[in-house]
Structure formats: C-alpha cells, structure tokens
Image: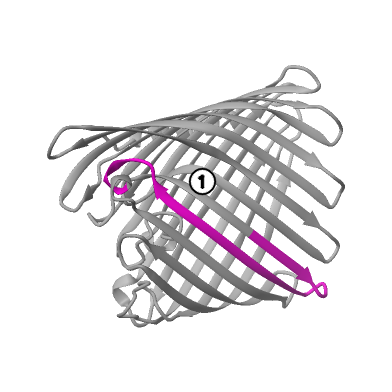
Amino acid sequence: MYHSGIGMRAYLLLGIFGLSLIPSANAAEWSLDGRLNQNVSYEDNVNMSKDNKQGSFVYDLTPILNANYRAQHSEVTASASYGIQRYTELPERDRDKQNYSLSGRYFTERASYSLSSSYRKEPSRNTADTDSGDFATNADRSTWSVAPAISYRMTPQDSLSVQGSYGENTYSNQDLSDNSNAVFNLSWSRQWTERYSGGLSTGYYRYESEPSLLGVSNSILSNSYSLNLLNNYIFSEKWKLQVNLGYRYTETENRLSIGAAINQGSHGFVGDASLQYTGEAFTASMGVNQSLQPDGQGQLNQKAGVNLGFGYRFTERLSTALQFSYLNSEAIGGLSQLLGNQRQNINISPSVNYRLAADWVLGASYRLRLQEESLGNGMTDSNTIMLTLGYNWQGFSLSR
C-alpha cells in the first residue's frame, strides 16, 4: 500500500525549485537566518504509567536554519533542523530529530500557484498527545507530505481556491501502525465588507491503514466528504473572530484477517472557531475545533479540542504566558470503534521568559499532563519542569 516515493519526492523538489527560476526582470532578494533551541527538563512519569512511574532529566538541542528567495512573482522558502534528545535515566530513549521543509510559490495579480513538501522524523512519544496516546513506545515516527494549491481572484471581492495534499506516517517498529491520507478541498470566499469575509468549501478525505488489535489484523479504508461554511470577522485592530462550521459523512471498510468484512458509516460536525485579542501588553486566544485525524494506532479518529492561551508582557524583557488544551479522541471506524475506544488529554503549562540580550532568551516553565483511556491504563499523569535557552541568529540578506 505504501511506496518509497523517492522518485516522486525528487520531482517534487525540482518542481518547487522550478517555481523560483521563472524569469524576473525586477530585483530579487536572498536571506538566511537561524535559531538554536535548547532545554533541560525533568519529567516524573516519562512513560505515563499508572503504577510503575519512571522519571528522568532530558536534554534537548535543536539548531534550525532558514533560507528564503523572493522575486517580483515568485518565492521559495526552505527550512532544515537536526537535533538530539537525551535521557539521563532512560538511555534507550535517546534519539535524534530531523525536520525539513521546502515550499515554492508563483503569483500574479490575480492567481497564485504553490507547492510545498515536508519531512519530519522524531520520537513517536513527542506527539503522543495528539497521535497514538502511547508514551511508552520507543518507536520513531516519520512523516512526509506534499501539498499543491491554486487560488484565483475572480473579482475584487471573490476568490476561488483548490487545495490538495498527500501524506504518509510510518513507525520504526510494530508497536504502531503505518497510515496514509489524501485530502482535496475546493473553496470560494468573498470579502463582503471591510471587516467581514465568508464563503463555502467542500472537501474529500481518504485514509488507509493496516492496524492489528487483540491479535486481529485489519485493513482499513475510509472515505469522508464534508461541506463547510467559512466566516472571518475583524471587530477592531485588537479583536478577531473566525468560525468555520461544516458537516461530514464517512464510510469505512474493514477487511479483517478473520471473518467477513465490516462496513461502517458515521457522520458529525467538523469545524473550528477562534477568538483572539491582541493588546499592547496583554494577549488572549480561545479556540475550539473538531476534525478527522489519523493516529498511530491505525485508526481514523474524530478529535474535538479546546485551547486557551494568555500572555502578558511586564517589560520589554520580561513576559509570562499560560496555555491550556483539552483533546478528546474517538475512533470512527475499525475494531477500536466497535470496542468503544476513547481518550482524553489535558495539558496545562504556565511559563515565564526573560530576554537576556537582543538575540538570547531564557525561559522557565511547568507542565501538567493528564491522560484518560477507556481501554488501557485509565487515568495517568505527569509533571515536567523545564529551563530553556534560545538564540536567534539574525543572519544576512542579499539583493540584486
């Protein structure tokens, strides 16, 4: 079901670079900058176990390099990072991390054509909150994706866009299940007033995986269709509201290693809403969302979440923030749905940051993580204290 994709990725990279080679008689600009992120933390329950809790100090170092090329009608952006993650008490969890992205865009007065791709490799545990829920696995997660898009401004107020994407998630051992997904979206938007814009979008989502649960292998194919209403309103320079609401229908075919195939259907609301406030010293944001997302257990899940964020800047150097997130994950197909598998994740994290110099930032934070599973460990928790030191390299730029 999955292909190496090496040739496809090579053509993709050539295509993105090709967007930047379109002749331009006007000035072009190249820029290069970077960041160095490092942190030391202590987590008291690395595996999110209920009884056998294991704690460890963790050191994380990630350098990031960004490059950009921009001309009158084209732009190419690239980013690369290669970091390390080391555990003092659990050396078997030591890993390297990689993240690469490349995107290109060609645009005219009315039209825009873009193509982007990314590759990421990291410990599966780092994304377990939103992915598998398995913090005890030693698996690495590799993700690659490609996303073309075209938008066209039909009138000064109306725009039409077509977007697509294809991605694969693979895991380094059999604890978790590889999966692939493809998305197609067609949308129309209109600037109704100076402050309000809205429109319609329709989408198609395809998901494939081959998980194994309770010793039973299962080939899953899901096709989902959705229709959405798009709304954006700017109250003032400080307040912004966005509401996208839709409805989806999903068909899932399960081919089990034993017994006959099982066909399942589900439907429900999808969408997201966010409210943002940006003041001189105080910022706040609130968001709710519900969407379909794959996970490392080989299931397609309906995920409903709430996010709250607050920030306050005391001085030009000293600032503080508070983040809260809640996520409910529920399988909509496969054996997990038949067994009623459901998971809730909560994260609460206050932090404080101090700018030592123009390019150096020192931070301290605390995180409380809670997870409850209907199947498995039940309710588990962990506490993490972290110190961070970041450096922003301003880089340089060249023009012609």
Which residue type carries mark 1?
Answer: Ser
**Element type at marker 1?**
strand
State the quadrant of the C terminus.
Answer: top right
- Does the segment drawn in magenta span residue 110? no
Image mark count: 1
Which residue is at 25% across, 42% downward?
A: 210
Q: Is residue 60 above or below residue 245?
A: below
Position of 59 compared to 157: left or right? left
Residue range highlighted in magenta: 308-336
The picture quadrant where one finds residue 391 is bottom right
In the rendered image, residue 58, in percent from the top left (x then y), is placed at: 44, 77
State the quadrant of the N terminus.
Answer: top left
The residue nearer to you, when weighing 84 against 148, is 148
Which residue is at 79% across, 70% downward?
A: 313
In the rendered image, residue 213, in percent from the top left (x then y), is placed at: 22, 51
- Does the segment drawn in magenta span residue 320? yes
Residue furthest to the left: 258
Position of 123 compared to 369: left or right? left
In the rendered image, residue 279, in percent from the top left (x then y), is placed at: 84, 60
The picture quadrant where one finds residue 301 is top left
Which residue is at 52% across, 74% downward?
A: 368
Which residue is at 65% across, 40% downward?
A: 69
Magenta-colored segment: predominant secondary structure: strand
The picture quadrant where one finds residue 208 is top left
Q: Is residue 307 above or below residue 338?
A: below
Q: Which residue is mark 1?
A: 101
Position of 6 compared to 351: left or right? left
Mark 1 residue crowding within 10 angstroms, few (<14) / some (14–19) / many (20+): some
